[in-house]
Image (tube, rainbow, N blue to C red):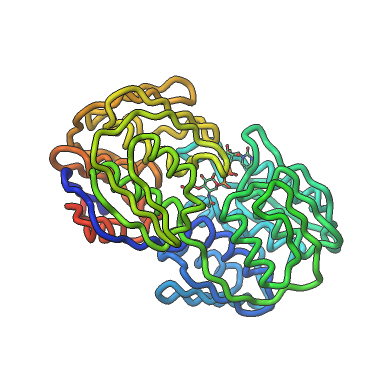
Amino acid sequence: MDKIVVKGGKKLSGTVRVSGAKNSALPIMAACLLGSEKSVLEGVPNLRDVQTMCRLLRVIGARVIFENDRLEITPFSKMKPVAPYHLVSTMRASVCVLGPLLARLGSAQVSLPGGCVIGARPIDLHLKGLQALGAQIQISHGDVYAGTKGKLQGKEIYLGGAFGSSVLATANVMMAATLAHGVTLIENAASEPEVVDLADFLNKMGAKIEGHGSHLIKIQGVRKLHGANHTIIPDRIEAGTFMVAAAITKGDVTVQNCEPEHLNALIDKLQQAGVSVKRSKGSVRVSRKGRLKPIDVTALPYPGFPTDLQAQIMALMAVTPGISVITEKIYPDRFMHVSELNRMGCRIFLEGSSAIVNGVQKISGAPVMASDLRASAALVLAGLAGEGETHVSRIYHLDRGYERIEEKLSSLGADIRRAKE
Ligand code: EPU
């Protein structure tokens, strides 16, 4: 097993290029199953989760060729509509094949994803939306069996849950509705940029989707979808992680290949904290000279502050003297990084779904353990600011969502390396 070893204290400077968005690529890869021909995706990040989705598509029945950042997916005329447990259990986003398989083949068997370290993560909204389109759903022995007699039927669907909208439920229902008979309206749809990217791709395949990016998406079903070419949008979470890295090291970093508009909530919070952020077309420059100010942050659905950057901003506030309050409204238990940050000398206390961060002047490197993808990123960031060496173990989590992070950070001047445990 690999670990990351970071020696803190280096100011980062220079330019770093962001990869394509994992959370766009995964549902778009699943959407390729809806087409009868080859689709070509560019800007696909080479990540463990992307490799898992490649394996899943091959198991279902598609020719998948992944070279550099280019992915060709050609669905076979005969597919096996099954997503087995050994793949779903390593990556929850496997559930994205449910909508496409149901729409294209009229049936799907997808293993039920279990809980995960960041929270309960049910899929009731996915199932509610597909049932509204006419699917019959049964859960038995840990698998979801979905089937339909004839075509799915367009419907008006309210897709809201206790925590608001759902990104992948919106994706699943939108994909299924592309081949349904008639019009589907998804109310309370997620408006995340990754949902917009998926809708743009589906429209290139011949779908008729309007309103993506708002909370009301209209889908006019069509008979058939073809293959399409598409470039995945830049990863706003990877970009945000490098922006925080610049701020936490008192650095000066230009983050290239990003969409500043997708980063407004983070930019606003960094500026409030006293970090300088300059936007240009396709890039942002983040620099910090003086002291930081504590800030309060609440993770919310887009365009609010992203939950996938909550751990990283907490690492920054942990080394900012004063009290910051960080609240999670998406995954109330997504705080696995807190106890590890505290091992490094941070002073963070949990109160329900809020973390009270009592920022300190200095933290020290320590052996810490990654528990999930974004928590791992927060520990690496803390390591960049800590005195001495931080050893982050279990970094297979990090490899699920960050492409060559140690190479990218070291190109900015960080003292960071990958080592064997
Ligand atoms: N929820 C339900 N029922 C459902 C679906 C979701 O109650 O059927 C709840 C969840 O438990 C959560 C909230 O709704 O409290 C929002 O979850 P959402 O469904 O939006 O999450 P997701 O679609 O499963 C995607 C990303 C996550 C990201 C969330 C929120 C992918 C592959 N995953 O998950 O990314 O945190 O949206 O933005 O797109 C990550 O990249 O580290 C990651 C976890």
Direction top: furthest residue: 351
Image spot of residue 233 (x, y percent): 51, 62
Q: Is residue 309 above or below residue 298?
A: below
Location of residue 271 (image quadrant):
top left
Q: Is residue 391 left or right of residue 236?
A: left
Seen from the viewer's position, the closer of residues 7 and 266 is 266
Image spot of residue 91 (x, y percent): 50, 53
Location of residue 207 (image quadrant):
bottom right
Q: Is residue 392 left or right of residue 67?
A: left
Q: Is residue 199 visible?
A: yes
Direction left: furthest residue: 388
Q: Is residue 383 left or right of residue 339?
A: left
Q: How many marks?
A: 0
Image spot of residue 383 (x, y percent): 23, 42
Seen from the viewer's position, the closer of residues 33 and 329 is 329
Location of residue 344 (image quadrant):
top left
Q: Residue at x 20, y 32 (%)?
A: 363
Image spot of residue 124 (x, y percent): 68, 41
Q: Is residue 105 visible?
A: no
Q: Residue at x 48, y 57 (%)?
A: 259
Q: Is residue 151 left or right of residue 12?
A: right
Q: Residue at x 27, y 45 (%)?
A: 393
Ligand 1 in which quarter: top right
Q: Is residue 165 above or below residue 21?
A: above
Q: Is residue 150 above or below residue 77?
A: above
